[in-house]
Image (cartoon, helix red, strand yellow):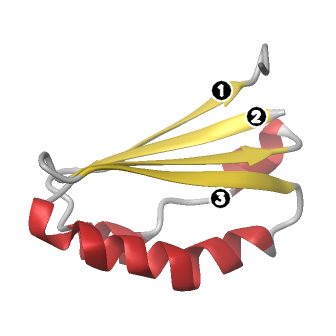
Amino acid sequence: MYAAVTTRQGVPERIDDATRFVREEGAPQAKARPGFVRGYFLVDRAAGKTITITIHQTEEQARAGGVSERLSELVGTRGQPTREVYEIAVEA
C-alpha cells in the first residue's frame, strides 16, 4: 500500500472551515476513488498547519490524486502545498 501526504501552511482561523469541507465533501469524494483505503486530516490549530494522508492500494492510485485547490483556498495556504507519496513498509 501507499500513502499520499499533503502538507499545507495556512491560517489558524480557517481550520474549522477546512475541516468542515473535508468532512462533508473531500472525504466522500476520496472514498469514491478506485483503490482508496482510508484517509486522515491532521490539523495544528495554533499554527494553521494541515496534513492530509490518504492510503491507496497502489502507487499509481496514490499519485493519481491531486492537491485539492478548494481545500488549499479554505485553509488560506501560504505558498505551495507539498505532496509526497510513500510506500507503507510496516503497519502496526
From the image, tell me which residue sits under label 3.
Answer: 65
The kind of residue tagged 1 is: Tyr
SS label for mark 2: strand
Location of residue 87 by image quarter: top right
> Which residue is found at the position 34% from the left and 73% from the top?
18
Give the x, y percent position of residue 35.
88, 55
Within-10-Å neighbours for mark 2: few <14, some 14–19, many 20+: many
From the image, tell me which residue sits under label 1.
Answer: 86
Q: Is 63 above or below relative to 70?
A: above
Quarter of the picture holding the N terminus: top right
Give the x, y percent position of residue 66.
56, 60
Location of residue 69 by image quarter: bottom left
Residue 61 located left or right of residue 44: right
On residue 2, the disc is: 2
Within-10-Å neighbours for mark 3: few <14, some 14–19, many 20+: some
| Of the image marks 2 and 1, the number of the one nearer the N terminus | 2
Residue 28 or residue 63, whichever sits in front: 28
Callout 2 touching callout 1 (CB < 8 Å): yes
The kind of residue tagged 3 is: Gly
The kind of residue tagged 2 is: Tyr
On residue 19, the disc is: none
Give the x, y percent position of residue 34.
88, 64
Callout 3 touching callout 2 (CB < 8 Å): no
